[in-house]
Amino acid sequence: MYDAIVIGSGMSDGWAAKELTEKGLKTLMIESGRNVKHIKDYPTTNMFPWEFAHRGTVPYSISKEYKIPSRNYVFDESTVHFLKKDAVQEYIQEKPYDWIRGNQVGGRSLLWARHTQRWSDFDFTGPLRDGFAVDWPMRYADIAPWYSHVEKFIGIAGNRDGLATLPDGEFLPPFEMTCLVEHLRDVVGRNYKDRNVIIARVAHLTKPQPIHIQQGRVKCQNRDLCARGCPFGGYFSSNSSTIPWAQKTGNLTLLAESLVHSIIYDEQTKKAKGVNVIDINTKKTTTYYARVIFVNASALNSNLILLSSISARFPNGLGNDSGLLGKYVGSHNYRGKVTAEYDGLKEFGTQGRRPTMSFMPRFRNIYTQETDFLRGYNTVIGSQRGHTDYGNDYGENLKANIDNKMPGKWKIFAQMMGETIPKITNKVSLDPIKKDKYGLPLLRVNVSYDENYEKMILDFFGQFTDMFTKAGFTNIESIDTKHNPGNENHEMGGVRMGKDPETSLLNQWNQLHHCKNVFVTDGACMTSTSSQNPSLTYMALTARAANYAVSELKNNNL
Amino acid sequence: MNRRVWIKQIAIVGGAILLIPACQDDRGAISLKLKFIRISDKEESLLSGVVETIIPETGTYGAKKLNLYHFLLKMMDDCYDDKQQEIYVKGLRQLNNYSREQAGNSFNKLTHSDKLTILRSIEKGKSIEDLKYFLAETRKWVIKGYNTSEYFMTKIIPYELVPSRFHVCVKIFSVS
Ligand SMILES: Cc1cc2nc3c(=O)[nH]c(=O)nc-3n(C[C@H](O)[C@H](O)[C@H](O)COP(=O)(O)OP(=O)(O)OC[C@H]3O[C@@H](n4cnc5c(N)ncnc54)[C@H](O)[C@@H]3O)c2cc1C
């Protein structure tokens, strides 16, 4: 019997484990993938480019086992071992959907791009104002202290920009913008009152504090090879930070290669009492018991576990009286990209590398509805002075270009990150018959784009073409990547929070309305998607819920 | 393992003469083991001729010294499916015909500058889709093999594994 069980060991899960174990709870963390120890299990981290047999490309015999993640930008010879093979967990795509999954201790916290934006009340009040989904059962003020709590521990490099749309946090020194983006910032500043170009806020240690040193992490060395796992602990991952921290308390038991099949509901106590766990290697099922359960298997897998947790009381999935479990699944709109070149700033270039980019917070529909689509988009802006163009020639000419030490043109790109509108028709459900090799029902995923989404892409193209034109950029190109939903890595919803048990699954503390000792604090809980990167908010919600759970346990309310 | 190479090795090592005729065709063995792609020693030397034309030795190392066609063949053998590999090899096999048509001789018999002329013309050629594919893939991987070689990344434009810095705006040269 444990005090707490945490399902999964990824980004939000690590936070649940850290908070619960620090407060003295004997906690069992259950992860379906293999164990990955910080540094020791980062096999590619110190490899030079030429040490990769295929210089980054994943051989076909391997990539054909990773058809889904192979469409993601992070997939290459240096990271493939941190992604889930298609066959490890099959799912049914009712519509094309790229479900990008980790399969190890640390989950996707090893792979992420580390962008960490706070949400503001413009995000939390979105559904209420614009009449979609349901109202969030909380506001910025409820979560702000928890943002601070998380930020101080993981370390965020950022600038205090003082913007209402993007609240400032607890920041380490920011990274800097390239002179090209400074130029864009000035042009944008002169032409638009409501638009700001800032440096992105990222979970990197630009100036480690004692709390980071205590975690064994040191300063970010600008390798920009993060997704291989960082030997310096320069960015935040569960492996380098929360999990070893929780282990140091002596209260954490980590069970890897163990797949949670379902949560067991006790009809007598009207609470969950434990979980059924399948050993990946022996396929034997064992039951583990605890007083509180945190479901953090990543958004869609948390949906799957709850849907699979059937009992006489909950024939349609745990806590699912409303029938909304698995519905209102959201993604982010990352399809639009605008690229350009710049002929100016010829005598300047950049030197070294940087694990981040610049950023334009959302400016559409902030105070009033002003476009023919709802909500808006943030934009990530990357720029560098490229190498001399290789051109199309062969032989001596080509080689002279490759060997040339002079830089070529400045290049810049803008990548949209749009909010989407969760809808009842965007959903996941269980296949009634088909099961995977471990006996878990196959998840059917039915998530697609809508008109709002398409209109937003066009607006993004238009706005950035204008801004880039004003900045004097050339060769401006709008690119629709046509990525499938899911490819942006930000799947959310299905177990949404809300005030009313009839229209939501979770209350303001991320407890199932109808089974109070089960907390869902990963992406599944999100009522709306905002346009900000979501994981900082998952972590803050998790820390908040975990501390609430601890106090409720103390008060014998669970 | 490449079956032909294997047989040749057996023949040399064990003197197993009996085994040879069964599998012998007019193709000689090539210098590295491939799992899927089957080309002859003559095709291998044609390929290495193309590779050396794309990245010749100049003041800096060229394809031959860096063994870039081995890298290229490894990429084609490991990273493509059988259909792509088939088109690739077909394209390679079209090169000598194309070269004879355009320049009156097989590719490797041309002078370096005629070889370059041939390569440059392929892009604009008609009804030679496989050859175009062959050349585009070859060019891509030969460049990659070159600019990510240890030689290039230590001697020509050094790569830093741990840069520890990002200077956002350094003066690199003055424009007149
Ligand atoms: C390339 C990439 C870039 C990204 N960039 C950003 C970014 O810049 N900013 C941002 O905010 N987010 C980013 N993300 C998203 C971010 O990684 C996720 O939001 C975050 O990791 C989610 O945390 P989680 O704990 O819910 O799930 P995960 O980190 O995915 O971990 C879930 C864990 O649960 C395990 N699990 C699943 N099912 C079971 C089961 N039944 N039993 C036991 N264990 C199970 C999984 O194996 C996994 O280890 C990015 C993701 C990727 C892949």
Image (cartoon, rainbow, N blue to C red):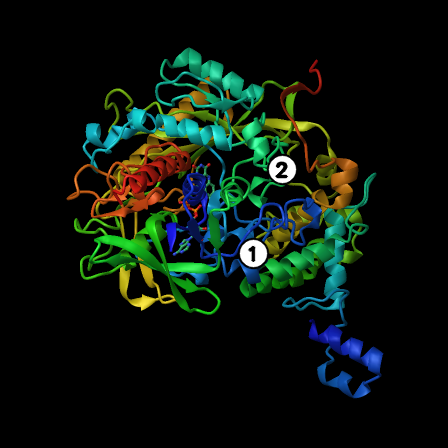
Picture quarter with the N terminus of chain A = bottom left
- Left or right of residue A421, residue B30 in this image: right
Q: Position of residue A491 (x, y in %)?
A: 36, 44
Q: Mark 1 lies on which chain?
A: B
Which of A62 and A119 lies nearest the eye of the viewer? A119
Q: Where is residue A292 in the image (x, y as percent from the top left)?
A: 33, 48
User: What residue lies at 55% left-to-right and 35% top-to-bottom?
Assistant: A235
Q: What kind of residue is marked 1?
A: Glu
Residue furthest to the bottom in view is B18
Residue furthest to the left in view is A502
Q: What kind of residue is marked 2?
A: Phe
- Callouts 1 and 2 on one subunit: no
- Left or right of residue A316, residue A470 in this image: right
What label sits on residue A190 in the rendered view? none
Q: Which chain carries label 2?
A: A
Residue furthest to the front in view is A555
In the picture of the structure, the residue carrying the numbered disc 1 is B129
Picture quarter with the C terminus of chain A = top left
Q: Residues within 10 Å of mark 1 (few under 14, many from 20)?
A: some
Judged from the image, the secondary structure of the residue bearing numbered disc 1 is helix
Does any portion of residue A41 appear in the rendered image? yes
Q: Where is residue A80 in the image (x, y as percent from the top left)?
A: 55, 52
Which of A378 and A255 lies nearest the eye of the viewer? A255
Q: Does the residue labelled 2 lie within 8 Å of ligand 1?
A: no
In the picture of the structure, the residue carrying the numbered disc 2 is A232
Quarter holding residue A488: top left
Quarter holding residue A220: top right
**From what the image shows, is residue A319 above or below residue A146?**
below
Judged from the image, the secondary structure of the residue bearing numbered disc 2 is loop
